[in-house]
Amino acid sequence: MPREWIITEYSGFEGLQLVDCEAEEPGPNDVRLRVEAFALNWGDADLMNDMYSFSFSAFPARVGIEASGIVEAVGSNVSGISVGERYCTLPYFYDRRGVSADTVLIDAEYVVRAPETLSAVESASIWMQYMTAYFPVVEMAKASPGVNILVPAGTSTAGNAALEIARLKGATTIATTRHERNREYLESSGADHVYVDNGGTDLAEFLRDVTDGVGVHLSFDPVGGDFPARYAPAMAKGGVFALYGLLSGAFPDFPIVPMFQSNGWLHTYSLFNYVQDAEACARGCAFVHESIANGDLKPTVDQVFPMEEYVEAWHYLRGERSTYGKVVVETGA
């Protein structure tokens, strides 16, 4: 019998329960997937604590933003998607219909064909990281030679994706990290410069120096808190603060005076809004598909857990890791 991981209150991942479920019949616009693998994302953890950009409308609820699986059935209005093909889910405001299950229904608008060169596990790991990075790096910053991009928390999957994509486009990137041991990984991913952050006061000076005084055109910032204030004096004229997360646990106190001085822009950014724009979503998907087919992007999977060890996978993700890449659950369905 199919299984699903659910929560019945905002209790964090420790409150997850593995229960039996039914394979539902698709509605007119739905696709039913037999899930092969699904990936963990920090936003899922925040959602289970009601600290995300949306809340559940009711309980019980499933979590999970991205999965890969085999199409088992399609609704009467769905065309171009055949039973037996491997598809992936795209990140969107999914309410209670997350992908942490052996079988899921997804609106056909939010599925995309899996890349032919990737395994099911790899296919489940790509869309959140690469699509999250694509829109700020390529469409906002117009990444190209002469464009300087700051990537805080560069070892995160989205941060690393930003480094890879910016390198493809010829932009200059500066990654930040808390540990010197991450330098080699960041440089291999595309970082031209690495700032090892010990909480000092020289971040803005470092950024001005490595950009020859031009400054940063885009900050792809998942940190928030006091971090933007530390680099704001090094933003280029018209530079964009693309805030997409709160790893610090606090909303940023934006430095208004330096933003006046640089004519800076604050862009609060959620990939979900771009996925829900059909034209924007098609551009992002096309970029990811083409880049993977050409070998320009290659996902890194750190660890794969079986379905029964979903909670253990969360403990691993939230622990102190010395390896990199996505954490994925393989259902065995």
Image: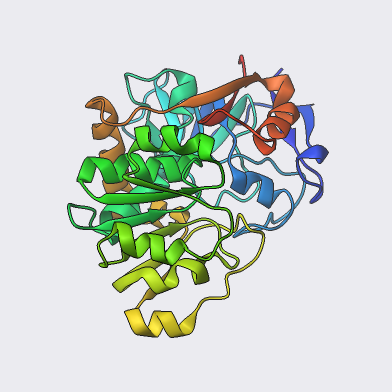
Along the viewing direction, whichever of 176 and 298 lies nearer the viewer: 176
Question: The N terminus is located in which quarter?
Answer: top right
Task: Give the answer, above or below, for where 155 lies relative to 238.
Answer: above
Along the viewing direction, whichever of 95 and 147 lies nearer the viewer: 147
In x, y percent, where is residue 103? 60, 27
Q: Residue at x 36, y 76 (%)?
A: 264
Query: Is 7 on the left-hand or right-hand side of 268?
Result: right
In x, y percent, where is residue 149? 33, 56
In x, y percent, where is residue 65? 55, 41
Along the viewing direction, whichever of 97 and 253 lies nearer the viewer: 253
Question: The C terminus is located in which quarter?
Answer: top right
Q: How many marks?
A: 0
For this orientation, the residue located farthest to the left is 145
Can residue 295 be seen by looking at this rendering? Answer: yes
Instruction: Tell me the quarter of the picture where residue 62 sits.
Output: top right
Q: Residue at x 26, y 25 (%)?
A: 295
Can residue 69 be seen by looking at this rendering? Answer: no
Instruction: Tell me the quarter of the picture where residue 141 sits.
Output: bottom left
Query: Is 34 on the left-hand or right-hand side of 109?
Result: right
In x, y percent, where is residue 127? 42, 38
Q: How is the image coloured?
A: rainbow
Task: Give the answer, above or below, for where 56 lies relative to 268.
Answer: above
Q: Residue at x 62, y 42 (%)?
A: 97
For this orientation, the residue located farthest to the top is 332
Query: Is 145 on the left-hand or right-hand side of 165?
Result: left
